Image (tube, rainbow, N blue to C red):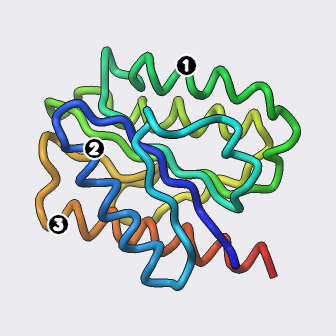
Amino acid sequence: MASILLIYHSGTGNTKAMAEAVAKGVRSVGVEVDLKPLEQASVDDLPNYDGIVIGTPTYFASMTAEVKRFIDDSIKYYTKLQGKVGAAFASSGDLGGGAETAVMDILRAFLVHGMIVPGFETGGHYGPVSVGAPDEGRKEVCERMGAQVAKLVVRLSD
């Protein structure tokens, strides 16, 4: 069965709420999802999944240091993640607070790994972002993203 590892770092609960909505979208397609706070995830998990999604709060217009450290540690599996699907999402404290650049930083790392990164026509072209706690509209965007990523994972694993 196709599977996705969904990792999130959350200080206030906003990114966690987004992650839960993304997971709901993945499950709606019938794909297995392991939802893990960053503190419970290991880079050794990465090769075991068909897709990897990472969510982060925005610190200084980028991902948190903890997420960056996790991604840096993923060099252990350089060339081993090629062809897997990758996606990202972020929360920020303000409009223009850097959430989109945080998402792009994660996606850039996925591309270096040779991963397949989808774009999204609505709700955030690179991945969902939320200013503060995600409202129902933002949660729907997260669910759609999760479903779209899951559908791509299924298509590529056939």
Amino acid carrying label 1: it is Arg
Q: Residue at x 56, y 77 (%)?
A: 31
Dot in front, 3 or 2: 2
113 displayed left or right of 34? right
Q: Residue furthest right?
A: 79
Name the one closer to the observer, 43 or 118: 43
Q: Residue at x 70, y 79 (%)?
A: 1
Q: N-terminal of the two: label 3 or label 1?
A: 1
Where is mark 2, residue-wise?
15
Amino acid carrying label 2: it is Thr
User: How many circles with numbers are drawn on the protein?
Assistant: 3
Q: Secondary structure at mark 1?
A: helix
Q: Is residue 19 above or below residue 30?
A: above
Q: Are marks 3 and 2 in contact (CB under 8 Å)?
A: no
* C-alpha gap between disc 3 and disc 1: 31 Å
Q: Report x, y in % for residue 99.
A: 32, 34
Q: N-terminal of the two: label 3 or label 2?
A: 2
Q: Residue furthest front?
A: 40
Q: Is residue 73 above or below residue 156?
A: above
14 displayed left or right of 57? left
* C-alpha gap between disc 1 and disc 2: 18 Å
Q: Is residue 64 above or below residue 136?
A: above
63 displayed left or right of 108? left
Q: Secondary structure at mark 2?
A: helix
Where is mark 3, residue-wise?
137
Q: Residues within 10 Å of mark 3 (few under 14, many from 20)?
A: few
